[in-house]
Each structure stands twice: as C-alpha cells, then as structure tokens.
Image (cartoon, rainbow, N blue to C red):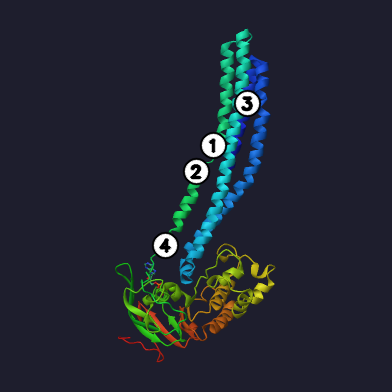
Amino acid sequence: QYVIVNGVVPFVTAVLTLASMLYVTARIDWRLAMLAILVLPVLLLLTETHRRGVRARWTRVKESESGALSVIQEVLASIRVVKAFGQEDRERDRFVRGARHALAEQLAVVGAETRLGLLVALALAVGTAAVLVVGARDVRSGTLTLGSLLLVMAYLAQLYRPLETISKKVAGLQSSLASAARAFSLLDEVPDVAERPQARPLARAAGRMTLRHVSFAYGKDRRVLDDVSFEVPAGTQVGIAGPTGAGKTTLLMLLARLIDPSDGEILLDGLDLRAYRLADLRNQIAVVLQEPVLFSTTIAENIAYGRPGASRQQIVDAAEAAHLDDFVMRLPDGYETEVGERGMALSGGERQRVSLARAFLRDAPIVLLDEPTSAVDTRSEAKILEAMQRLMQGRTCFMVAHRLSTLDICAVRLRLENGRLLAADDRVRVSAHG
Ligand SMILES: Nc1ncnc2c1ncn2[C@@H]1O[C@H](COP(=O)(O)OP(=O)(O)O)[C@@H](O)[C@H]1O
Ligand SMILES: [Mg+2]
C-alpha cells in the first residue's frame, strides 16, 4: 500500500499531466510541445536508475531496522535472563550495531533521494528555459500570443510539481529509529539493584546460602515473602514447592539478586549478597526458567549465551550433557541452525534442553530452576529430569516446582505458602532467628 500511494500514484499523475500538457501545447504550438517532450526521456532515465538503486537499499534499511527492533523485543521479553547472565552490555552492543547499520543505509537512501531531486529539478529547469526561450522568440515574431505562452508555461509547472513530490518522500523515517532507542532505555529502567562502592570481588563461591528474616513486597503493601529464614550448606539441592502466587519466583529472583529484600538479608558463604560485586555475583549463577528464553541466533550461540567465547568442544559437551546433541546432529545445519525469533523453530522440550545446555556450559556453583519441566511434554520430561539431576550434582540448587512430588531429586524440600515457609526436613535449619 505504501509503495502504491507513494511511488506509483505520483508517477501516473505525472505521466497523465505530461500527456495532457503535450496535447494542449501541441494544439497551441507543436514545436514547443516537441521541445517539452525532450525532457521526458531524461526524467524517465533518471527516475528509473534511481528507483532501481534505492529499492535494494530500501529493503536493507527495513531489514536492519527490524533487526535492531527485534533485539529490543527479545531483551524486553527476557530481561531476567539477560540480567541473570550479566549480558546487558552485549545486548546493548547488538542493538547499537543494528541501529548504526540501519542509519548508514538510511543516510545512503536520503543521499540518493536528494541527488534525484536535484537532477529532476535541473532537467525541468533546462526544459522550462528552452521552452521559454523558443516561446519568447515566437511571441516577438508574432507566431505565438503571449497568452498561449503563459498557458504552456503553466502546464510545465503542473508537470514539475508531481515530479518534485516523488523526491520528497524521505522524511519521517528517522523517527522510528529514535523511538527504538527510547524503548531500549527500558533495560536501564527496570528496577535494578545497586552495587556498593566498595563491593568485593568474588571468583567462585562455595554456595552456602543463608536467608535471615527475608521479607519482600512489590510496592508498599504487596507483601509476597514474609520473614523467610533458612540455611543450606554448599552443594545442597533444594526443592521449593507451593501454589501459584506463593512467591516462589520472587524467592529465586532474590537469590539471584535481581531484586533486594525489603527486610532481612541473604548471605552467600556468610556474606550479604549486597557486599559482592554484582557482575561477580551473577557469574556464580545459572538460571533455567519455566519458559526457556532463547535469542534469535544459532543453537551454538544460544548455548554459549552465559559464556561468550566458549569453544565448540565445550558447547558440544554441554549439549551432550543436556541430551540435546542427538537432536542437533540430525539438523542439516547442526549447531549453526537458527532457532528463529525467540526460539520458536524448536519445540518446548528442545528449547528447554538448549537452556539446560546453557546452564551446563555456564558451570556455575549456584543453579536456579523455576518450574523447568512444566512447559514440556511428558516424553521429554524424563530426559530433561535426568539431565537436570546431573546439572544439579555438586552445586547449590534451588528448584521450584508446582507439586512437591516433582522435587524427588532434591535432597531438601521446602514448601512456600502465602509467602511463608511452612515445611522443611531435618537437613535444613528453618528457624525464627536464622
Ligand atoms: N513485578 C511484580 N509486581 C507486583 N506484584 C508481583 C510482581 N511479580 C509477582 N507479583 C505478585 O507476587 C506474588 C508472588 O509471585 P511469584 O513469586 O511469581 O509467585 P509464584 O512463582 O510462586 O507463582 C503473586 O501474587 C504475584 O501476583
Ligand atoms: Mg513462578
């Protein structure tokens, strides 16, 4: 539709105007009409060359623009994963690269449009001048009346206007990129946690986790966790069950320090999470969410998301650990297969295994799993559970599930209800004073 309104209609108008102008002019003075018609092939040549060059460019502008925009969409949809894996800068770079590319292509288009505008104006000015010179001579010699010449000139102006509009269709494009940049600033606006000026570095945590009287409220009175206290030694697999809305996801977000407690404190290896450098802390953590978050790139890059620069062998090892290798080997492009926007080219179970492979490759001492099997079919569930069990080995894990029974693989099981910790077994200390 855009193409028709902005490209074809002015062109047809121009042609019709030209034809009628030639008809009228020819009836007044056929020599002037012939002169005016000389402009036509020049104009056709100019616009045709231009259209051909710009059409390809235009496609590239649209492509790179939507490329940059899809980065934003992905980031907004998966902000927790981006942050939990500490990849904010990479996403910003990805967007800036795309946007810069789109801008360069747009400038090239604008340049071409401007050149066309100038050349069209020049050709028309030359044509107009020629008609005027010849016509004025005829008026002086008495073969043409002044009124007729003015009429011819008026028609020429008519022709000029629609042709000029073609070269002025450029404005209004810059704005879409500007709005994209605004949307991206949301990454910074999502409620964030602050890093202390003297934050400690942390190479690799052991993984002992202590919660002391932790409460959390969204906003002022939206209390979700209420005085939660427990301690688990490093390397413990903790299962957390509870009904929807009990605060399970919120608890995991607190453990990853995506949010800070409203009251109380969370300690890692005996130190408050807030004492550590944020990037170092996030480096200790791998997350697997209910809805696996994939980015529209290759399987290999998706697996390596939490560990940029991983070798191919490491990626393959991680895929094998997640029972993903067989599936990938059957794909014609193997690890270079594009997973499509948000990984939609894969099934739920395949997506979840990619995110498990990602967690394996991350090799973090702490693993957070939020209802990792609730979105996969029962056939892949057994495989995924088996892979998950190995992922959890030797790491401090918090695995959330709707039902307690799915937490059999966990050494310790907790129950969360209405923001309060209800039941625990003897391997974990749940007490009022931590
Ligand atoms: N960003 C948020 N803002 C306000 N309320 C929220 C937000 N996220 C979750 N909640 C509320 O907090 C409660 C606990 O949510 P959540 O931790 O996701 O529970 P669960 O994972 O156990 O289902 C729910 O009532 C939910 O509506
Ligand atoms: Mg949840």
Residue sitting farthest toward the bottom: 426
Amino acid at circle 4: Asp
Which callout, 3 or 1, points at the residue further toward the start of the chain?
Answer: 3
Compared across the picture, whether 345 is left or right of 250 comes to: right
Residue 227: x %, y % from top left: 31, 80
In this figure, which residue is indicated by the disc labeled 4?
188
| Residue under the point 57% across and 66% down | 343
Callout 1 environment at 10 Å: few (<14), some (14 to 19), or many (20+)? some
In this figure, which residue is indicated by the disc labeled 3?
18
Q: In which image quadrant can residue 33 be found?
A: top right
Which callout, 4 or 1, points at the residue further toward the start of the chain?
Answer: 1
Which callout, 2 or 3, points at the residue further toward the start of the chain?
Answer: 3
Amino acid at circle 1: Lys
| Residue under the point 29% across and 69% down | 221
The local secondary structure at tag 1 comes to loop
Amino acid at circle 3: Leu
How far apart are the alpha carbons under marks 4 and 1? Answer: 37 Å
| Residue under the point 57% across and 20% down | 153
How far apart are the alpha carbons under marks 3 and 4? Answer: 56 Å
* Residue 336 appears in the figure: yes
In this figure, which residue is indicated by the disc labeled 1?
168
In this figure, which residue is indicated by the disc labeled 2?
172
Do the residues under discs 2 and 3 have CB atoms within 8 angstroms?
no
How far apart are the alpha carbons under marks 2 and 3? Answer: 29 Å
Residue 384: x %, y % from top left: 57, 79
How far apart are the alpha carbons under marks 1 and 2? Answer: 11 Å
Which callout, 3 or 4, points at the residue further toward the start of the chain?
Answer: 3
Question: Which is more foreground, mark 3 or mark 4?
Answer: 4
